Structures are given as C-alpha cells and as structure tokens.
Image: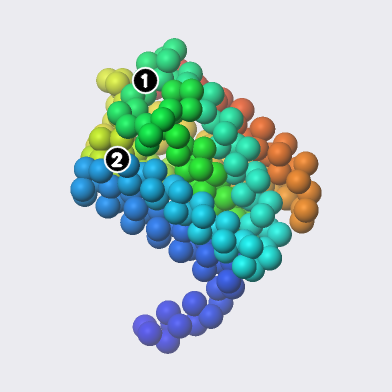
Amino acid sequence: MVVKQTTVMKALNTEDRLVLGSLIGTLAGTGLAAFLTAPELFGVTALVLFGYLLAGMIATHSERLAWLLVYGLVAGVLELWVDWLHVVHLRTLVYTHSFGFSLLASPSYMPLGWCVVVAQFGYLALRLRDAWPPWTVVSVITLVGMLLPPWYEEFAASAAAWHYTTESLKLSQTPTFVILGYGGCMFTVAVLALTYYRPRFWGGAILAGLFASAGFAFWGLFWFSLLG
C-alpha cells in the first residue's frame, strides 16, 4: 500500500500537487467553519487558497495556472450578478455573513471563492484531457461537480454562512436544484477550459470567464424553474 501511494505521488507534477493541496484546503477550511460555526472562516479559506494558488503560479512560472486564475477571477466577479438575482429577486438564497462588507448581495470573498473553484475544476479538466477523450473528461467533471461542491453548501448551513429558503426537495440541507446546478456549472467550466485554453491566450481566459458566468446563471435558473 505504501509503495502504491509513493508511486502515485511521484506521478503527480508540481502543478498537480498545488491543485490537490487547494482541494484539500477547501474541504478542510469549510469543514472547520462548519465544526466551529464560524462563517468568517469561509472568507479566510477563500483568501488563503487564492493566495496559495497565486504564489504557486508565480513560484512555478505556470502559464496554465495563470490562465486559469484569470479565467476564474473573471467568472467569480461576474457571478456576483447571479447571486444578486437569487438573493434579491428570487429570494431563494440568504447570506448571513458578509466578511466585512458585501459586493452587490454577496459576501466580499465570494469572487475569490469562485475563482479558486473554477481554477481547480478547469485544471482537472485540462489534466484529464492528457489521458481521456474530451467527452469523458466533461462527464467526469460534471459528476464530480455534483458530488464535491455541494459539500460546501452543507458546511455553509452548519457554519451559518448562508442558507436556502425554498421548500423544494433537499438532500440533507442542500436543495436538489443546487446540486444539479453545480453539475451544470462544472460542465460549463470544463467545456470552456478545454475550448479556450492556450498558453498566454488572455483574451480566451476573459471570454471563458464571461461565458462561464452566463452558464452559471443559466444552470441556476434552469434547475430552479424545474425543481425550485
């Protein structure tokens, strides 16, 4: 068992370890926030992980991580409008902590939180493309998107960071339309990363971020209209 684990770790490059570390850090930070009922730890986690990926990108001179962070930051900033729609107009989402101040209707850390998630899943899509055909990559990322990010929703409710007001079907504390919406969002992230990524193609990163935010809005509204 130890030999197998050592072989797997050797197969991972420096970028892989950085992204894997960020995924572990995301679960650890949000899980600790839930355990301590400390919503501010969601903001701390987002800031620390963004800084971690940024520092890792600079230290490794990774053009791929640089592209993904631009992609994620554009998507994360524009996702504020999606949150605003759900908080102000649909009234399905309630944030109970702003981490100092709000951006539109979202806590101040939310763009960085989404930036980290987009960079993580975009990276996974690009790396898996080295071994699998695109349709398999997108399918796997979509499935993982329905399994992993919804845990953040569970932790958020326990941490008193945010909650949903709808009486629709839920798995534990997370509405099913949110789980399926995450799957759609990660489908979008993967497709756009595979389509637009080229080293130093910053215009492609910006376009991908723009289209990703539109995809986030579409999937959120689509599944809410069916199940919300």
Task: Say which residue label 1 marks.
Answer: 92
Q: CA distance from mark 1 to mark 2?
A: 19 Å
Viewer-closest of 26 and 56: 56
Q: Residue furthest bottom?
A: 3
* Image x and y of residue 112, in percent: 51, 43
Question: Can residue 139 be seen at all in this image of the molecule?
Answer: no
Q: Is residue 89 left or right of residue 10?
A: left
**Image point 64% across, 63% down: which residue?**
58
In contact (CB < 8 Å): disc 1 and disc 2: no
**Image point 68% across, 51% down: which residue?**
67
Q: Is residue 82 left or right of residue 135?
A: left
Task: Say which residue label 2 marks.
Answer: 39
**Image point 58% across, 30% down: which residue?**
78
* Image x and y of residue 84, in percent: 47, 21
For the C terminus, which image quadrant?
A: top left
For the N terminus, which image quadrant?
A: bottom left
Is the residue 128 above or below the residue 86 in the image?
Answer: below
Q: Which is nearer the N-term, disc 1 or disc 2?
A: 2
Q: Residue furthest front?
A: 100
Is the residue 224 above or below the residue 152 in the image?
Answer: above
Q: Residues within 10 Å of mark 2 (few under 14, many from 20)?
A: many
**Image point 60% across, 41% down: which residue?**
73
Is the residue 10 above or below the residue 143 in the image?
Answer: below
* Image x and y of residue 191, in percent: 65, 43
* Image x and y of residue 22, in percent: 46, 58
